[in-house]
Amino acid sequence: MAVVLEVEGLKKKYGSLEALKGISFKVEKGEIFGLIGPNGAGKTTTLRIIATLLTPTDGRVSFLRFDLKKNPEKFREKISYLPEEAGAYRNMKGIDYLNFMAKFYAEDEAEIRQFVERAERICGLGERLKDKVGTYSKGMTRKLLLARALMTKPALAILDEPTSGLDVINSLEVREMIKAFTREGVSVLLSSHNMLEVEFLSDRVALIDRGVILDSGTPQGLKEKYQASNLEIVFRSAVQ
Amino acid sequence: MKNFSHLLIKEIKELVNKQLIISLVFIVLIFNFIGNITKSEMKKAMAKQKIAVLDLDKSEISRNIIGALNMANFIIEEKAGGKEEVVKEVRSSGLDLLVVIPVGFGQAVSGFQAGEVETYSYLNGISMTGSRKSEIVKALLGTTNEFLSNQYLKKKVPDVNPQLLKTPIKSREFVVVKDKMAEGSASAVIGSLYAQSFILPVILMMIIMYSSQMVITAIAMEKQNKTLETLLTVPISRTSIVMAKMLAAGFVGLLSAAIYMFGFRNAFSFNTGDIAKAMSGVAPILKQLGLTITTQGYALFGISLFLTILVALSLATVLGVLAEDYRTAQSLNVPLVFLVLIPYFISLFTDINTMSLPAKIFVLAIPFSHPFFAMQNIMFGHLNLVWIGIAYNFLFVAAMLYWTTKIFSTDRVLTMKLKWGKKKVVL
C-alpha cells in the first residue's frame, strides 16, 4: 500500500519539557491509524505538528512526499484537521459555516456546492443547518465540524479525540461517520484516550506514552502479541 | 487573493454584528438626546428672559437703564415696595434675577459720584440661562458706564476725545511666523487654529481606540470560540490571516469612529459652518502667515494617520494573541488606550515644543503621538518633524508586522499567553 504520511524521529520540546522523544510511524492510503495513550502522552502535540500548527524541535514529517518544514502550505491544501476542542463561528448558520470553509478548498462554485452537499449528508443535521451554530448542542456542533473536516475528501483527515465530550448515541454516530468516510479510500489519523473506540475504528494503532511509541500494529495483532482481550490491557502490558 | 477576500468578508461580517450595530445606534441616539437638550437650553438662553427690577430711584437715568434692559431682550417685571421685601418676593416667584436701583442713584451719577446698582441672582441649579442673564446685565451696565463716563469727560474736557483720555496708549499687534508677518491678534490666530483643530484629536483618538479594540476582540473571539486552530490549518497564508483581521478591524474601526463623530458633531454642533464663521475674520491673517493647509499637507497628514492606524492594529494583534477570551481582550486594550490618551491630552493642553527633552522624547516615542502633532507641524512648516514621525511609524509598523506574522507562523500564536505562574502546555 502507498504511504501517505511518514513520521520519523519526531521530537518536540516546550522549554525543558520533552513532549515527544523521537516518535516514528507511517499512515497508508485508505487506512485509519489510531494513536492511543493516556492524557499527556503526546498525542495532541503529534497531531498539531502534522496539522502545521506546531513546529517540531527535530525529526521529519513527510506527507505525499512533501516535507513539513519546507512545504507546510501543501499540507494545508490536502489535510483536514479536527481539534479536540474545536468550535464553529457562533453567529454563522451551519450551512454558511460549511460554505465558508468549502471556499478555501474548492476551485469553483460547482465544487463548493459538491462539498457542502457532501457535508450535509455526513452530518445529517437537516433543517437545523439553517440555524445559527450558537444554538447547536455539543453533539450537533461536533457533527458539523466532523462534516467540515471530511467534506473536501482530504488525502488525510486528522481527528483529535473525535468523540470527546459526546454522549453514547452521538459518539456511536460520529464513529460510524468516520468509518463510512474511509470506505471512500481516504486516510485518517486519529487520537483518543478511549482505547475501545480506537480498537473499533482503527486498522492499525500506535501505543504512545510520555512522548514515546511503545508498540504499533493492528489491534488484533497487538492483542495476540500481548495475549489480551482488548487494547486497554494491551496498553497496560506495554507500559509495564 | 480569492481566499484573502473571502476571509476578509467573513471578518467584517463577524465584527459588524447585532451588538455593534445596537451600540452604535445607541451612541447616536444618546448624542442626539444630549444635543437636543443642549440646543433647547441654548434657545432658552437666547430667547426673551423675564427679570425683576426694583427702581427705588425713579430718576431719568434709572428709567434709561430700565429702557436699555428692555432693548436687551429682557421682559421687565417692575416691582414695588421695600428692598428686603422684594428680594424675598422674587425668591418665591420663580424669577432668577433682580436688579435694584437704589434711591439717590441718579443724583450720585449726575454729581460725578459712583452710583450703585445691585443685582441678585437666584441660583436653583447650574444652567446656561441663569449665568447668561447676569452676564447680559453686567455687559449692559458696562456700556452704560462707558456712555456716562464719556459724557462726564466731554463736559469737563470738551476739547479732548474722551477715548484718548481713557486709553492714552494704543497698541498694534503683529503676528510673526517664520519669515512671514501679519497685523492681527496672536490670541485670535491661536483661537482660530484651535477651533479648526479641536475636533481632530478626538477623531484620532476614536479611530485608534475603536480599531485596536476591534482587532483584539476578533482574535480573542477566535480563541474563545475555539475556531483559531481550524482557521490556521486551512490553505491560506498566515500573513493573509493577519492582514484580513487587521484590515477588517481597521475598516470597522473607521466606520464606528465616523458614526461616533457624526453623533458627536450633531450633538455639539461642531459643524463646518461654525468653524468657517469662527475663521472668517482671521482667515486673511492666517493666509498671510501661511497657516493654511495645502493639498500636500493633507496628504502628509493622511500618511501619518494611516501609519498610526497600522501601528495600533499591529500592536492590538499581538495583544489579541495574548488574550485568552473576550474578557481578557478588554483589559489588554487598556494600556493601548493610555498610550493614545497621553498624546491626546498633551495636544489639547500643552505645546510639545515647550516640554523638557526627556518628556518630549517619551511622548514622541509613542507612535500614536505623531499624527496628533502632525497638523500643527504642517501648518508651521516643520515638515522635517512630520517626515521623521512618518519614518518612525513606518519602521515601527514594519517591525510589528514582521513580528506579528512570525507569531502567527509559529507555535507562539497558540502558546503565547499572558499568564502569571507556570505555563500550561497541552500534550
Image (tube, coloured by chain):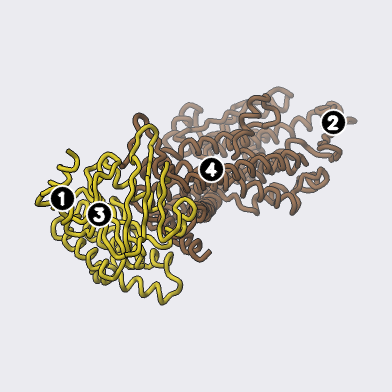
Determine the chain carrying the residue at label 3: A
Q: Position of residue A175 (x, y in %)?
A: 20, 61
Q: Which chain is yellow?
A: A
Which label was assigned to residue A34?
3
- Same chain check for tags 3 and 2: no
Q: Amino acid at mark 1?
A: Lys
Q: In the picture provided, is B56 more to the left or to the right than A182?
A: right
Of A110 and B180, nearer the camera is: A110
Residue denoted by label 1? A225
Q: Amino acid at mark 4?
A: Trp
Relative to B267, residue B420 above or below: above
The N terminus of chain A appears in which quarter of the rendering? Answer: bottom left
Distance in Å between CA atoms under marks 3 and 2: 97 Å
Residue denoted by label 4? B403
User: Foreground mark, 3 or 4?
Assistant: 3
For residue B144, what is the image quadrant? top right
> Is disc 2 placed on a helix, strand or loop?
loop
Q: In the picture provided, is A68 more to the left or to the right than A141?
A: right
For the view shown, which residue lies furthest in the left direction? A229
For residue A79, what is the image quadrant? bottom left
Q: Are marks 3 and 2 in contact (CB under 8 Å)?
A: no
What's the residue at 67%, 29% (across, down)?
B106
For the view shown, which residue lies furthest in the right direction? B159
What's the residue at 20%, 59% (across, down)?
A201
Residue denoted by label 2? B170
> Is disc 3 placed on a helix, strand or loop?
strand
- Same chain check for tags 3 and 4: no
- Same chain check for tags 2 and 4: yes
